[in-house]
Amino acid sequence: MNQNNTTGIYIHIPFCKSKCPYCDFYSMRADNELKDRYLSAVIDELATFDNVKIYDTIYFGGGTPTEFGADRIVRVLNFIRENYKLAENTEITLECNPQSDLLDLFSEVMATGVNRISIGCQSIHDNELKSLGRLAKINDIEKAINDARKAGIFNISVDLMLGIPHQTKESLLKSLQFFIDKKIPHISCYMLQIEEGTIFQKRINRLSLPDENSVSELYEILTNTLNHAGVNQYEISNFAVKGFESKHNLRYWNLTDYYGIGPSAHSLINNSRYYYERDIEKYITARKKIYDGNGNTYDEYIILQLRLTNGLSLTKLKENYGFAFAKKKLTVIENYVKAGYLIEENDNIKLTTKGMLASNRIIADLL
Ligand code: SF4
């Protein structure tokens, strides 16, 4: 189905067992009372949706959505099913952290349609997990994968991280091989960012982080290893066996519509962007979507399409926005091609692996 005719729904679940020291996502510990009040607010917002549209991706992100509990997740999904049209093969993703007690929850949510699980693993090594303040161990990771499959969910994604304190080429290779051996069909791998206001930012001088060159080498190992194993790169940080690419995340890069529910969630609707403030009480008691300017603009299209390995189509750029790169920018592209950062293939320009590592600079030069 063409995603231009459909809409996605992102539901932010801002609850976590504890706060990881590098994390900047909006999340907190919560008791059942707060979770119930939040559930009511989410359903109130869902009740305002357009019932003419067809929804084909639903994504529970966080936070740690499993902290919301199976019953509340099921109630949200039932509400959507009872009131709106879902496409056949709607992708319904639930993020979780590796824990040993997820089988019942997976079984319950699977029965209401969750068909994709995204597990925040980050690494399989105790020393790396410990340095990230992660609670899980390799056994929990293994158990979560097995439990998803036991519950009948085979579309599994794992999150890994690059540039973790103590990470080496060997440790990254072992993490990758572990998930390749487990036949995980989707892997996301983001670089550790030191975000403002986090504990990591305060401790930055005491963290033994790999330097920039080492991170570049790790990135090359990542792309080579996964591509070689048939888990093909389709976006700067995302890899999938053919057919397992994340339909929901492709919305972000292809600039197709999605509603974002919950504090800190962003939406793109009819070429306008909106967001909610990072304040759960405000969301529950005085929900107000804030307009965040035009979306699907010429600049956004270049920025987001270049993240994809399919690259940026110059014809589509012209078709969508009435013009493509001016002569001066074509020279910039030519220079990046000569230097090995971009490739031109037919009508498309694409970042090479070297280009992906310098994508911010290249994209800035093209705008
Ligand atoms: S579990 Fe995820 S969302 Fe929660 S604090 Fe850790 S990194 Fe952030």
Image (cartoon, helix red, strand yellow):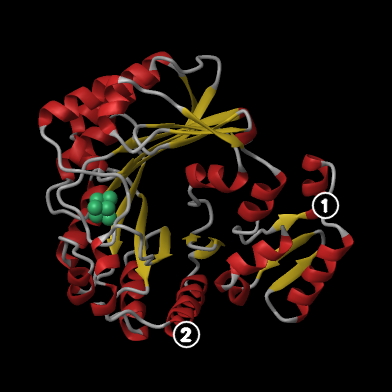
Residue 135, image x, y percentages: 15, 60
Ligand 1 lies under 8 Å from the Cβ of mark 1: no
Ligand 1 lies under 8 Å from the Cβ of mark 2: no
Quadrant where the C terminus is found in the figure: bottom right
Rendered image quadrant of residue 161:
bottom left
Image height check: is 259 above or below 63?
A: above
C-alpha distance separating marks 1 and 2: 34 Å
Residue 188, image x, y percentages: 42, 60
Closer to us: 215 or 7: 215
Instruction: Check disc 2 and report its element: helix, strand or loop.
Output: helix
Find the residue positioned furthest to the right: 327
Question: Would you call the spot at circle 1 few (<14 residues within 10 Å), some (14-19), or many (20 or more)?
Answer: some
To which residue does mark 2 refer?
213
Residue 236, image x, y percentages: 54, 63
- Residue 1 seen in this snapshot: no
Q: Amino acid at mark 2?
A: Asn
Residue at 82 percent across and 46 percent down: it is 318
Q: Is residue 354 left or right of residue 195?
A: right
Rendered image quadrant of residue 110:
top left
Q: Report the disc number at residue 1.
A: none
Instruction: Check disc 1 and report its element: helix, strand or loop.
Output: loop
Q: Is residue 268 left or right of residue 180?
A: right
To which residue does mark 1 refer?
324
Q: Amino acid at mark 1?
A: Ala
Residue at 21 percent across and 50 percent down: it is 147
Closer to us: 269 or 182: 269
Residue at 20 percent across and 33 percent down: it is 70
Image height check: is 216 above or below 117?
A: below
Q: Is residue 255 left or right of residue 327?
A: left
